[in-house]
Amino acid sequence: MRTGTARPMAASVLLAPLLDGPRRALTVAHRSRLALQLADEHSRVVLGVMFPGAVRLPFGCAVASSPSASSSLSVGDGVLAWGDDVYTVARWWRPARPRHRTLGAAVDPDGVRRLLLRWRRLLGRGPGLTPYGDDVLCGALVTLHAVDHPALAALRAMISATALESSTTATSASLLRAACEGWCIDELADHLAAKATGARTAETRAALLRVGSSSGRGLLEGLALIAPGNLRQVAA
Amino acid sequence: MTRTVQVRRGAYQDSVSLMLISRELSDRPGVATVQVAMATALNLDLLSGLGFDLPEGTSPNDMVIAIDAADPTAAEATVAALDEALSRRPATAGALDPGAPPPATIGAAARRVDASFALISTPGRTATIDAADALAAGLDVMIFSDNVALAHEVALKRWADDAGLLVMGPDCGTAVVGGVGLGFANVVRPGPVGIVAASGTGAQQLMSLLDGVGLGVTHCLGVGGRDLSADVGGRSTLAAMDRLDADADVDTIVVISKPPAPEVAERVTSHARTLGKPVVIGYLGVGRPDLTETARRVAEATGTTWQPPRRWGADAPAPRGGYLRGLFVGGTLCDEAMILAAATVGRVASNIPLAGQPGLDAALTSVGHTFIDFGDDQLTSGRPHPMIDPSLRLERLRRELADPACGVVLLDVVLGHGAHQDPATDLAATIHGSSTPVVASLVGTRDDPQGLSDQAARLVEAGAIVHASNAAATREALSLLEVAR
């Protein structure tokens, strides 16, 4: 049996390589009322610990309560160890990764061109844990991935070649890397699905706008930059 | 010693709560035995067997408290501790709406929240009413309860068919819905596989073997062990296959079942051809693939590299005389082992006999090669399932290991949520020092809370041979018998 006080967590499958790998030390990169962002030895945020009510980040694990205060923090060998608390996976979940090729008909080529020209100006622009410019970029990246747009490969290559941690916050850098692969929060995926199917978007838009202080709005702007209409409007 | 027996009329508590309380009280100083249970025939027999004098005129609605303590003071203190434990009320749905009384029915609960699914675990006699209430509220239903009448199951599934809903069960012990494990469920990673299972431990074996090769499962929809019978007609199986076909996260559908009625098996096979996704069908039966072979076929269908399931333990000892004794907590695992054993040794007796094979008497006396499913309805009425409460099987294991006619013991150990938190330790203590070989199938995933490797190590330290595959465990157990050679 594992030692320490066993606690359950629901973990994103994106954390599987980290949890299955050898034990490595982590540090707290950012702390808020609803979540903690944990960074590895390279100061990369690799794991978000989310408390009830938090937005579920693609690289997150949900726990029932705040861990005990301790500086001893590690992940690997199947557990997240925090002082005497040992979190094991009671449930795995798959983060959203929308695919809506039909939405490709709604893509604005000018919007894609503007993004390719101006993405560097967006990077790290704005205050907060996830700067507004990064949110816009994430929304656009996830939309390009959703429609399987050929421009994504070029944009992904340029972003990969950028020292993100020195350009923006560590948490935002990790969200950008996830968005390059199409991973996003449920609220953005739900809104994309509504747009792609021509369903009502009022509720999904409102839910997205409730994310963070301005993150939802930024994601929405990024989506609108690439696909300003929905399918019904395009067909009309 | 002081022996005390009390009966509390109409004081109903579920069997798992009473088992946990009994365990807790047994650790008190001056207490040798505490058994708190509902007064079902099975539990009364067990208490009589422990030497307690029981009053006449009890019913299964009564709670019986039997205490063997060092003196009257210890017995009284134990009763007081019992009252305190019983008064600890669990959190109820009322906690979602502080100040409001908890809902009295499933339908009332469904009206308070945006629910789409109900899990029912009430005694079998009343589960039908709760399930009907849930269907009327527009909910899919998982019926964990066993001992539900066949006619009730058919009626519920007809209703669900008409309403476009899904009834999972009765006796649906295992499900994974959107990654959430329900009942006895292993911790599996989401993946391209969706399972329809008319078999609880069969589903657990399949999920565990797929996990072993890194293949994830998004849904495992249990439908109850009778769904593919001629009477039920596979109604839930067909509905569940349609659900998985419509699910974008599922690429490959698997259907597994204990031996189905031939005409229903054909209906399911025909339905599979109408779906847009590949369907792997794994019906257990003579001459059919075992669960491990079905897992291999699923891996092949998904393009996953197959590796033979793990084996832990020393080299096999030399073959010996005697009979094979299979002691199982999983009905499907027991079925699978019997099918393989019968093909080698011929006659195998069981409390859940295969067609044409002998049954056991009421005392479950071993007759030659003998298999017992301790999870059978007859042995779980008013008691926790043996995956939770191992006491009945442990007692039988002691007897088999002491029986000179017993050549090899074959057993299953099932891990995951809902199961005993450390099943290997008690088994290992019983096996340790025995000269009779013990072969175990260990059904679990790398993320199960008991720790797959830890559990295997405990059994191996006690001298057992352990396999991740039940079929492989059975074959090795058979190879240890001279008669099978």
Image (spheres, rainbow, N blue to C red):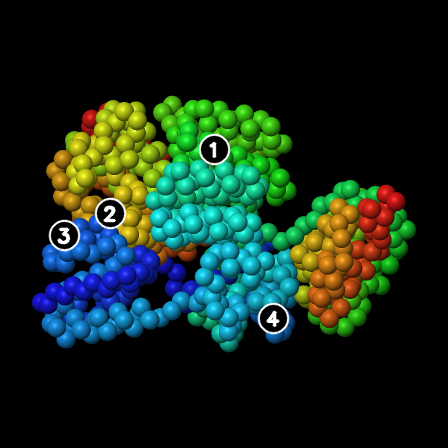
List the residue tagged with mark 4. Answer: A34
Q: CA distance from mark 2 to mark 3?
A: 15 Å
* Place of residue B154 in the rendered image (x, y in percent of width and height, measured from the top left): 44, 37
Is residue B2 in view from this perspective?
yes
Q: Residue at x 70, y 51 (%)?
A: A182
Q: Residue at x 51, y 60 (%)?
A: B109
Mark before the other along the chain sequence, 1 or 2: 1
List the residue tagged with mark 2. Answer: B393
User: Which of pointers 3 and 1 indicates the residue nearer the eye?
Assistant: 1
Task: Name the residue furthest left.
Answer: B1
* Place of residue A67 in the rendered image (x, y in percent of width and height, measured from the top left): 51, 71
Which chain does the numbered disc 3 sit on? B
Query: How many other residues sit within 10 Å of disc 3, few (<14), some (14-19) or many (≥20)?
Result: few
Judged from the image, the secondary structure of the residue bearing numbered disc 3 is helix
Q: Amino acid at mark 4?
A: Leu
List the residue tagged with mark 3. Answer: B49
Q: Amino acid at mark 1?
A: Gly
Q: Amino acid at mark 3?
A: Gly
Residues tagged by mark 4 and mark 2 found on one chain of the structure:
no
Q: Looking at this view, is B16 or B426 the one in front?
A: B16
Judged from the image, the secondary structure of the residue bearing numbered disc 4 is loop
Is residue B290 in view from this perspective?
no
